[in-house]
Amino acid sequence: MAFSLATWNINSVRLREPIVLKLLAEHGPDVLCLQECKSPVDKIPREAFTAAGYTHMVARGDKGYNGVAILSRLPIEEVGAEDFAELGHARHVSARLENGVTVHNFYVPAGGDEPNRERNVKFGQKLDYLTDMRDWFHAQKPEKSILVGDLNIAPREDDVWDHKKLLKIVSHTPTEVEHLAQVQDAGDWVDVTRKDIPEGLLYSWWSYRAKDWDAADKGRRLDHIWATGDIAQAGHSSHVLREARGWEKPSDHAPVFATFDL
C-alpha cells in the first residue's frame, strides 16, 4: 500500500481553512498532519475537511495556541497523546493506519528568543520536552512508525540560510541540535527528507518579518518527516511545497511531503 503524507504548521487552522482546503484539493496527501492549530478540537472545521474526502481525524487542541491534528482519507485509529515535560500543552497526538504504521504528530516548543534556560523559561521547557521525547523512545522503542511535525529545530548547516550567523539563534544552537539528535538516536529515526534530498539548502519556514520572504530567502528547515529504520527505505518523493508560503494569508511554514510504499 502506497500512501502520501504531509506535515504543515498551519498557524491557526480556522483562520487558514481556505489554504488547507486548497492543499487537499490540489495536492491531495492521503494523510495531513497539522500543528499550531490554535483551536479546541470541537472548533476545528471538520465538516469542510470531511466534505473534501478527509473523513478521519484525531486531534488535541488548546484555545488560541498549540494544537495538533491528523486528517486522513484513509482509516485511522487514535493511539494516544503524550504530555512531554508536563507542560499541559496540546503538542502531540498519534494514530495508526490500517497497514499498522503509527504516525506521531509533534509540535515541539519554539523556545523563546534567548538560548539560555536560566534567563528564558521557554528555552528550558523546549530542552525538557526534547529530553522527555528521548526518554520515551528509549523506553518504548518505536517500530513501523513515522514521526512528523514542527520540531522547531533546523539541525544541519544547510538547513538554515547562514549557519554561522544562526549558531546563537534559537532553533539552530548546538544545544538544541544535540538534543534533537538524541531523540533521533533513541527511536532509530531516519530523516526521510534528507535521505531523499541529501545535499543543498532546504527550508520549510520563512519569517513574516521579511518584506519579501521569497527574495530574501532567509529560511530554516524546522518541519520534519522521520521514519523508523525498519520502514525508512520505503519513503521517497520528499519535497517542500515552497509555493504554499506565498498563498493568500499564508502560514509562515510550508508543507513537507513524503510518500511511503508499504
Image (cartoon, rainbow, N blue to C red):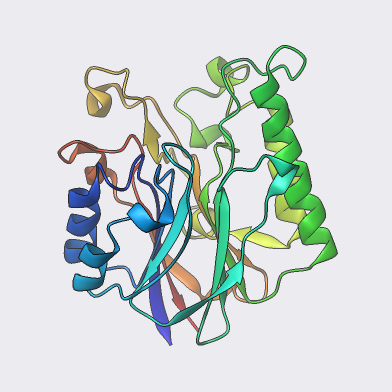
Q: Position of residue 27 (x, y in %)?
A: 23, 64
Task: Decide: is 195 above or below 127.
Answer: below
Q: Position of residue 211 (x, y in %)?
A: 23, 17
Which residue ends up furthest to the front in the rendered image? 42
Task: Decide: is 93 above or below 145.
Answer: above
Q: Position of residue 252 (x, y in %)?
A: 33, 34
Q: Residue at (70%, 53%) from the top-left corner?
A: 184
Instruction: Out of 243 and 25, give the one closest to the viewer.
Output: 25
Q: Residue at (59%, 36%) from the top-left corner?
A: 109
Does residue 227 appear left or right of residue 30 in this picture? right
Q: Quadrant of the N terminus?
A: bottom left
Q: Residue 195 occupies which quadrant of the picture?
A: bottom right
Does residue 196 appear left or right of residue 175 in this picture? left
- Tell me how many marks there are: 0
Does residue 102 appear left or right of residue 203 in this picture? right
Which residue ends up furthest to the top in the rendered image? 119
The reply to whether residue 239 is in sight is: no
Task: Decide: is 200 above or below 239.
Answer: above
The reply to whether residue 63 is in sight is: yes
Q: Residue at (51%, 35%) from the top-left corner?
A: 158
Does residue 155 appear left or right of residue 27 in this picture? right
Q: Residue 188 occupies which quadrant of the picture?
A: bottom right
Instruction: Out of 50 and 218, give the one closest to the viewer.
Output: 50
Instruction: Out of 35 and 164, give the one closest to the viewer.
Output: 35
Q: Position of residue 207 (x, y in %)?
A: 36, 25
Q: Residue at (47%, 39%) from the top-left corner?
A: 221
Task: Decide: is 190 above or below 167.
Answer: below
